[in-house]
Image: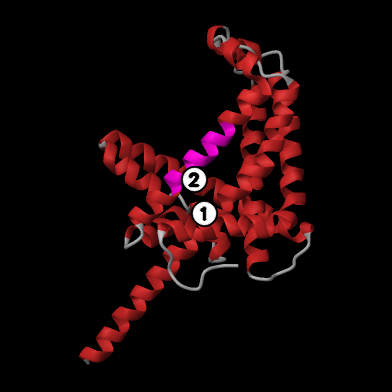
Amino acid sequence: MLPETPQTIGGVLDAGIKLFRQTFKGVLPVAALFAALMAVLSIATTNNGSYEALLVGDPTGFTPAIFGLFIVNGFIFLLFIIAVAQRQWGLALGRERSLVTDIGRSLQLLIPVAFASIVYYLCMVLGLLLLLVPGLIVAVTMGLFLVVPIVEERVAWFAPFRSHRMVWNGSFWRTAAVMTVLLIVIMAISIAAQLLIGAQQGFAMLTEPAKPSVLAQVLGAALAVLLYPIMTAVMLVTYHDAKLRKEGDDLDSRLAELDAT
């Protein structure tokens, strides 16, 4: 399922979509499980009495219960991404593992990936504060950190720096182009779905903030079952391509040193 040689921008995108299509059936159970959990938590958050206060900017609405729900939501989202990407990667390599095994491995990676997420966002914010360009560079070069521990089967604590090392030397513009196209596609699908799901409520919220309906949240979770596997598939192939290029460059350098010797 994975390319054996470095690809063009179009080749990477095509390989990512192929990986998504070929693994979607196997990924569907884990994606549906975490999407359902996200829907339940989202409904619980928006139906909390303090949520409406937050909508109108009242800081008293930020209660411990709301804070706890936001934190749990964040961890479930990370588990969603990790579990889906891990399932896709295993299927791409021909490894048939049980759903329980994949979820267990995802739970092991949760805390290191959460720490890596904090490192990534701190580096990106620091870059944006210093100068806009460094922040954008960090966003691209470190942006594949989520798939580093899956592709390389290594500890994820400092995955953003590993991602930077792989992408910065020879794959920056290619990765930036691929991730930009991916972001545009996901945003276009999301906007179209939101217009179909609840255009009336969406337009009303422009003038008067209101909590999303239960139907909109359930349909949003169903949409996540489609969108997140597309995102992780493209990210996996993009990092795999950067790794192929980096390892090829390293091999060329070693051969050149041998020739010189």
Q: CA distance from mark 2 to mark 1?
A: 9 Å
Quadrant for the C terminus, please: bottom left
The mark found on residue 175 in the picture is none
Dot 2: few (<14), some (14–19), or many (≥20) neighbours within 10 Å?
A: some
Quarter assignment of residue 108: bottom right
Q: Which residue was labeled with disc 2?
A: 182
Give SS at disc 2: helix
Q: Is residue 209 covered in magenta?
A: no
* Residue type (three-letter) at the residue carrying disc 1: Met
* Residue type (three-letter) at the residue carrying disc 2: Leu
Q: Main secondary structure of the magenta part?
A: helix
Q: Residue at x 73, y 18 (%)?
A: 47
Q: Which residue was labeled with disc 1?
A: 235
Q: Residue at x 67, y 60 (%)?
A: 22
For the record, the magenta segment spans 179-190
Q: Nearer the viewer, residue 96 or 116?
A: 96
Q: Residue at x 58, y 36 (%)?
A: 189
Q: Position of residue 12 (x, y in %)?
A: 47, 59
| Sequence-first tag of 2 and 1 | 2
Quadrant for the N terminus, please: bottom right
Q: Relative to residue 217, is residue 58 depicted above or below?
A: above
Q: Position of residue 183 (x, y in %)?
A: 48, 41
Q: Is residue 184 covered in magenta?
A: yes
